[in-house]
Amino acid sequence: MGSIYAMIAVALTLSIGVINFLNFSIPGVFMVSAFVVWIVMQLTGSWLFAFLLALLVGGCLALLVERFTWSWLNNVDPFVPLVSSMAFLMLFENWALTMWGSDLKTLPSISAADVRIAGTVISLPQLAALLISISLAVALRFVLTQTPVGRALRTISEDKEVASILGINVNRTVRILFVVSALCAALAGILFSVSYRQVHPFMGEIIGLRGISAMVIGGMGNVWGAIIGGILIGLGEVAAINVFGADFVDIVIYGTLLLILTVKPEGLFGAPVSGRGRV
Amino acid sequence: MSGYAGALLTLLAINVVFAYGTFLPMSAGQLNLGAAGFIAVGAYISAFLSNSGVPLYISIPCAAVFAGCLALIVSIPVLRTRGIYLALATFALGQVVQATFLNIPMFGGAAGYPVVEHINSFAIVCTAALVVAVSALIFATRFGISVVAIHDDERVADLMGLNTRAFQAAAFSLGAAVAGIGGALYAHHYSFIEAQQFGFGLSITAVLYVIFGGTQTIVGPLVGAAAFTLLPEIARASQEWRYVLFASVIICMMAVRPQGLVTRASLRRLFEGRARG
């Protein structure tokens, strides 16, 4: 579970870190891509095709969201794009609800094999999710520090206007950013549908909001922080279930979030002065 | 008045109260994503008091005072944060409140909490009108001008000698009190409350009403709430499509006119045009 929170947190932290925008549509993209996996599995039964289509849909949705929250919204109140992205979340959720109803949909199992590590049963997809999320962070780190696109993104996060003067195509780079962050969310959706074998129109709200907490705990704009935050939230959830009971999980998680925001808003691993995050 | 129109008017009145609960902090530049938390506090407190025999005209104000005081207490740590951090802190607060009510056995926990005392539509509409009138009155005073100044530029307002922290805390708590009233009205009208109703979705909806109507003027939230309560009825949309429609309209609206439907400039144009003509 932690690794899925971690990937959503990475998706969110990318757009916070570079353009200081909390993209609330990410949980929606997560849910839609899980649904795409379910639909394709109903129709064709090919996992590969399902995964590819889910990623594709995630990327396209990102471009749509980018149009309406970034391209057409310059020089407005800073919370207007945020509100727009919340409207997108609402749109995705209710659209899924009208199309497929509110029942819990179940998926077939991809692999029956479980791995035993020190007596704990870990299913293969869950292990894969952990590995994928860590390699994703390594890859993103590499892209951000070593490639031209990464350099452009870091310049934009420092100052958008200066980046533009330096000849960086800001709009194009931001579009890439939106797509990459949506692909992270779509990947999380795929892994969720494979690991837990169920999809639901409002799963984005439940899981995605935990991802937001993971992002804050790790420090906004910090990719590794997001991964660690996600895993901490996952572990904390299990610990809270064991210590206080399942009913108190939300109180513990969101209480911690509130505490961190008020006491140490830069998160556990954020830079000390971070009104705007860094990648 | 037919039963249908009455029900619609009641819903409208309750939504208007929710919208003003979100509008008051937003007019001071705070995006409150946790309005549902204060709505829940109001609903449960008033329900509990009236179920233990307290008359409604005492229990509803009590709910408002309680929600307001809670907001005042939490505003001390929460308002230390800024911008997106503040929005997230209010979001976390709303989630904590919801989860707390979900776990109090006295209030029925997840099973919900029945409310005995019923309140009729007329009283709800009157209360909503009162809330709007009081908000308008507040905004006509020095307090309102100061709050708007803080919204437009907090640093300048601070330099001009305004105690920005106090004004922000006041706007936040007033909003919470209004949300509490809305929650109490909701509880007494529908006679049953469960914590699941007061989730993130409700907070977002309230924010969207305000944003749609526009945050600059006092009539904005009224217009926004009215538009989104009445339009789907006219379009005869089903419950699910209603939200799809609602979200799509918001998205397009933000792209074309991000400042909301009603702005200071548009009001001025309207009234000056009328005075001249």
Image (cartoon, helix red, strand yellow):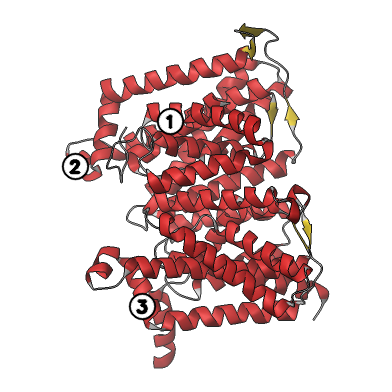
| Residue A5 visible in this rendered orientation of the protein | yes
Element under disc 1: helix
Residue B147: x and y in percent read: 37, 72
Q: In which quarter of the image is the C terminus of chain A?
A: top left
The residue identified by callout 1 is A226
Q: In this view, does A63 lie to the left or right of A75?
A: right
Q: Is residue B158 left or right of residue B172?
A: left
Of pointers 2 and 1, the one earlier in the residue sequence? 2
Residue that appears at 61% across and 15% down: A125
Task: Read off the chain for label 3.
Answer: B
| Residue A48 visible in this rendered orientation of the protein | no
Check disc 1 and give the amino acid type.
Ala
Q: Is residue A269 left or right of residue B3?
A: left
Q: Distance between the residues labelled 1 and 3?
A: 41 Å
Q: Distance between the residues labelled 2 and 1?
A: 28 Å
Residue A85: x and y in percent read: 49, 47
Check disc 2 and give the amino acid type.
Val
Residue that appears at 39% across and 46% down: A263
Residue that appears at 60% across and 82% down: B130
Q: Note whether A194 is above or below B111 in the view shown.
A: above
Task: Read off the chain for label 2.
Answer: A
Check disc 3 and give the amino acid type.
Ile
- Residue A18 quadrant: top left
The residue identified by callout 2 is A162
- Callout 1 environment at 10 Å: few (<14), some (14 to 19), or many (20+)? many
Task: In this rendered view, identify the residue nearer to me: A201 or A132.
Answer: A132
Q: Note whether A126 is above or below A238 in the view shown.
A: above
The residue identified by callout 3 is B145
Task: In this rendered view, identify the residue nearer to me: A249 or A181.
Answer: A249
